[in-house]
Image (tube, rainbow, N blue to C red):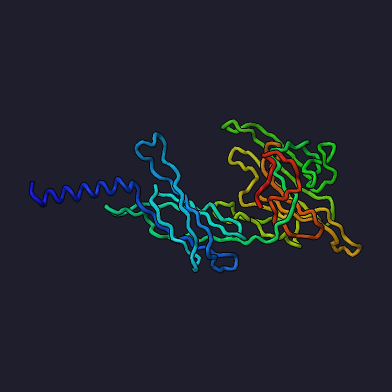
Amino acid sequence: MNFLTRASISLIFLAVSSLNSRAEPEAMFTVHVTDETGSVVTNAEVHAGFVESIKPGWGWGGGKEKKWQGVTDTNGLCVVEETCQGEAGVAAGKDGYYWSSGYKLRFTNYVGTLTQKWEPWNPTVEVLLKRIGKPIPMYAKWIRDAKMPADGEPIGFDLMKGDWVAPNGRGATPDFIMTYHRVNGGKTASGYQIHDTTLTIAFSNDGDGIQSILVPPRRGGSALRLPREAPEIDYMTNLVKNAFERPERSSTGTSEDQNYFFRVRTKKDDKGNIVSALYGKIQGDFSGFDYGKLTFTYYLNPTPNDRNVEFDPTKNLFKNLSSLEEVRAP
């Protein structure tokens, strides 16, 4: 065997050994962190998560998690470089800010022989950090699969009690007045029950109301989804939601972008000016009413005329809630 042949074999051996040792192509991306004013955030923690391919001796499975951590520089930038299977998750945070998480990267293909690199190479991930303002104690509760007490009958719901108004529950003040009505038909070809169902939400006082706000679900962004303050005007006196099952199409009446602000327990002077009211928010939509149950998450500020709805999750005014009812999101 001549020297050239031996050298060629050695190079091939080294290349194969290198590929086996790396096991996966390398990914690189830059995280750019800014605040709500557009200013860069320095010294922010950046966390990245990857899935590492299964190695000999690990047993069965698709791999295991691999974590990476760094900080942003004076330009709010942090360069992440790591081998992976082709996907990455990103989160960032800093003291005084809400964490932002749920950012996903998926790499399309890789190039190179000895050194393999995922494409796109070094894209930028824009991450927004929102400052923690003035979180306050609130009545915060996840109402989960609450059975509607009656069909076609207005039923009051007390936000401070977190329950239906008596005699259907322990509540005393009808902050929300909810009317559920379902009309059934036959069956679809697939065997589903044909129906038209409405949920109407009305209020007790002149000046009470609800206001829609559309915010995409948090697949990548701040833990604080909604504005910190409820609006002062433009509240609707009622909300009507409709769900249906028909032979041609169906709807649950729920949107993943839907959220609400509300105003309740409003008092006015003899000139019609609001002198006292309570404000709050509903994070997410009303759901489940198409089957006679109701699920929603609400936050109520108990201080009259204070429109702050930034919740302090360590100070829920509901005590001793079950794990399913606890609300920890801001």
Q: x%, y% of residue 201?
A: 76, 47
Residue drawn where x is 62% and y is 62% of the image: 131
Q: Position of residue 279 (x, y in %)?
A: 77, 56
Q: Say if residue 51 shows up in the picture.
A: yes
Task: Name the residue located 75 percent from the left edge and 58 percent from the top edge.
Answer: 235
- In which image quadrant can residue 251 be found? top right
Which residue is more in the foreground, 171 or 239? 171
Residue 154 visible? The answer is no
Q: Is residue 187 above or below residue 301?
A: above
Q: Is residue 124 left or right of residue 246?
A: left
Residue placed furthest toward the left = 2
Instruction: Give residue 77's position: percent from left, percent from top.
Output: 48, 64
Up/down of 132 relative to 86, above or below:
below
Give the percent coordinates (x, y) of residue 58: 39, 37
Q: Nearer the viewer, residue 110 or 314?
A: 314
Judged left or right of residue 292, residue 207 is right
* Count of numbered marks: 0
Q: Residue at x 61, y 57 (%)?
A: 98
